[in-house]
Amino acid sequence: MLTPSRVWKVQSIIMGSVEQGDADEVCASCGKAAVDDVKLKKCACDLVKYCGVECQKNHRPQHKKACKKRMAEIRDDRLFTLPDESHFGECPICCLPLPIDRDKSFKNTCCSKRICKGCSYANQKREQEQGLRPKCPYCREPVPTTDEEIEQNDIKRVKANDPAALCDIGKRVYLEGDYDGAVQYLTKAAALLEIEAHYQLAMLYRNGHGVEKSKKKEMYHLEEAAIGGHPEARYNLGAYEMMSGRIKRGVKHLVIAAKLGDHDALEAVKDEFARGNASKEDYEAALRGHQAAVDATKSQKRTEAEAYFANNAGN
């Protein structure tokens, strides 16, 4: 039975006039308290708790508006938080951030690890000096030299549910015209938290390849990719927001993309500053962040490798 004080507390929760600490103590629907040996579970919005699914369903009409508002705020907090690094992460050998330019790193099919060119070059140089057979600088497996060996490696990694391999296969079959297969591989990779797969799925939903066109799903996957540090996805979100008239949100996205090392995003912030849409502080933050991101990817080994591969291009 609800006591008068508990009735007041439940009503206060419904009306939104009770402190969060008090809301944590009782079920927002029936008023059962945690002190009554009832295990309360938080709503996804983290504003209220319930003693069970039935109470959560019963309270939904009263709570729906506040819940949706809070969930949108939580989503925005995640969306506009600068990731620690781009979705490429660090080179697993030298532990420096990988450049967002894909041409400055290699992905090995044997282990699906992306290695910076500096470490790849150092390994290649050592093998040549010692007359060794080429091996992956990370897992030390022999480097595949034929299409058949590469395909066998792909099959092995896919069977192991390697998200990077699933994503790569998804992109490959897409280029071959197998849109349905691309959706299956990319969806599975995205479920395994492969950020690139989210970006590719956004493109599928934009173009309606293998799926029905859906702006809502395109934006969801773009946002997931952006949250995971994908500069291109972040840039696209910025462009969408600008075209929709949400200038401040668009500039926020572009500044974050610039801070991840995206040069096009930096130029876009510069243009918006010239138009008066971005503040001086926005432009300065983008400049400093972009330079810091680029500098963090530099090393003597990488500089030597870049010169070596440039001189031997086409040989």
Image: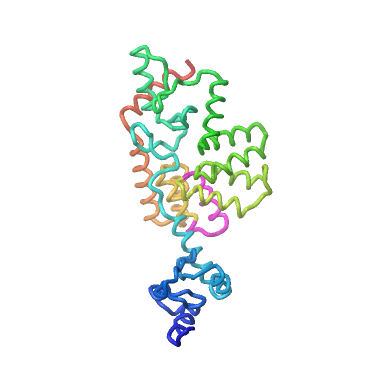
Q: How many marks?
A: 0
Q: Residue at x 62, y 41 (%)?
A: 184
Determine whether, in the image, residue 151 is placed left or right of residue 270.
right
Judge by depth and name the residue closer to the eye, 178 or 141: 141
Q: Is 243 a magenta residue?
A: yes
Residue lying at the far left in this picture: please name it.
300
Q: Residue 290's image quarter?
A: top left
Percent across and percent down for residue 309 are 42, 22
Q: Is residue 254 above or below residue 189?
A: below
Residue lying at the far front in this picture: please name it.
37
Q: Residue at x 31, y 28 (%)?
A: 300
Q: Residue at x 50, y 42 (%)?
A: 194
Judge by depth and name the residue closer to the eye, 4 or 12: 4
Percent across and percent down for residue 136 are 42, 24
Percent across and percent down for residue 80 are 44, 55
Determine whether, in the image, residue 13 is placed left or right of residue 58.
left
- State the extent of the magenta-drawn residues as a range: 230-249
Residue lying at the far bottom in this picture: please name it.
4
Judge by depth and name the residue closer to the eye, 206 or 251: 206
Determine whether, in the image, residue 31 is placed left or right of residue 57.
left
Q: Is 153 a magenta residue?
A: no
